[in-house]
């Protein structure tokens, strides 16, 4: 691993830690604090519902977490948003594209090889045509490996 690569990896991990954990927690605490002390304390009706900051936090957390879990579930399982994100990741990430192209090529070849293995397991000989097909599959794989770079 080169020094340049190490720095970019550190930068990536820093951004992940910041955005996923620190900024998320900091934003939640900030939102709870600001909404309580600037809004709820100033309105008597809201202040009677939430007489203390702790009650407000417990109420918001007990209602908010299940709602946010349902929203996250809907995002991944019930909407087209996650599918679009996955499509963009495959389009933009050459490693993901390579995995997809390898998979599309390998499955038909694996099925063919399994057919030949079953035949050999049954003590049957491969015909000249089947041996020729195996050589042609080998050439296809070799070309794919030589031509496809990330």
Image (cartoon, helix red, strand yellow):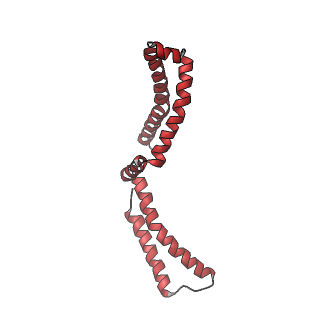
How many numbered circles does the render carry?
Answer: 0
Give the x, y percent position of residue 27: 45, 26
Instruction: Please tell me which residue is depicted at 46% across the width and 80% down the height of the picture.
Output: 133
Q: Is residue 10 left or right of residue 120?
A: left
Frontmost residue, 143 versus 34: 34
- Dividing the picture into quadrants, the one containing residue 6 is top left
Instruction: Please tell me which residue is depicted at 57% across the width and 86% down the height of the picture.
Output: 125
Give the x, y percent position of residue 112: 50, 75
From this viewpoint, which residue is outermost toward the right? Answer: 122
- Tell me if residue 44 comes above or below residue 110 in the rendering: above
Frontmost residue, 117 versus 48: 48
Give the x, y percent position of residue 114: 55, 74
Instruction: Please tell me which residue is depicted at 44% across the width and 67% down the height of the picture.
Output: 105
| Image quarter hosting the C terminus | bottom left
Frontmost residue, 69 versus 94: 69
Q: Is residue 97 in view from this perspective?
A: yes
Give the x, y percent position of residue 149: 39, 59
Q: Is residue 1 in view from this perspective?
A: no
Instruction: Please tell me which residue is depicted at 46% across the width and 63% down the height of the picture.
Output: 103
Q: Is residue 32 left or right of residue 94?
A: right
- Tell me if residue 24 comes above or below residue 49 in the rendering: below
């Amino acid at each position: 691993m080169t020094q340049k690569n190490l720095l970019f990896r550190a930068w990536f991990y820093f951004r992940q830690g910041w955005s996923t954990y620190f900024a998320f927690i900091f934003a939640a605490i900030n939102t709870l604090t600001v909404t309580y002390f600037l809004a709820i304390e100033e309105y008597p009706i809201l202040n009677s519902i939430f007489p203390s900051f702790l009650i407000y936090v417990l109420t918001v957390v007990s209602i908010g977490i299940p709602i946010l879990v349902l929203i996250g579930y809907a995002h991944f399982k019930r909407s087209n948003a996650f599918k679009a994100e996955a499509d963009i990741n495959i389009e933009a990430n050459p490693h993901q594209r390579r995995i997809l192209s390898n998979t599309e090529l390998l499955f038909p070849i694996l099925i063919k090889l399994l057919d030949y293995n079953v035949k050999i397991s049954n003590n049957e000989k491969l015909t000249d045509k089947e041996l020729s097909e195996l050589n042609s599959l080998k050439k296809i794989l070799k070309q794919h490996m030589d031509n496809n770079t990330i």
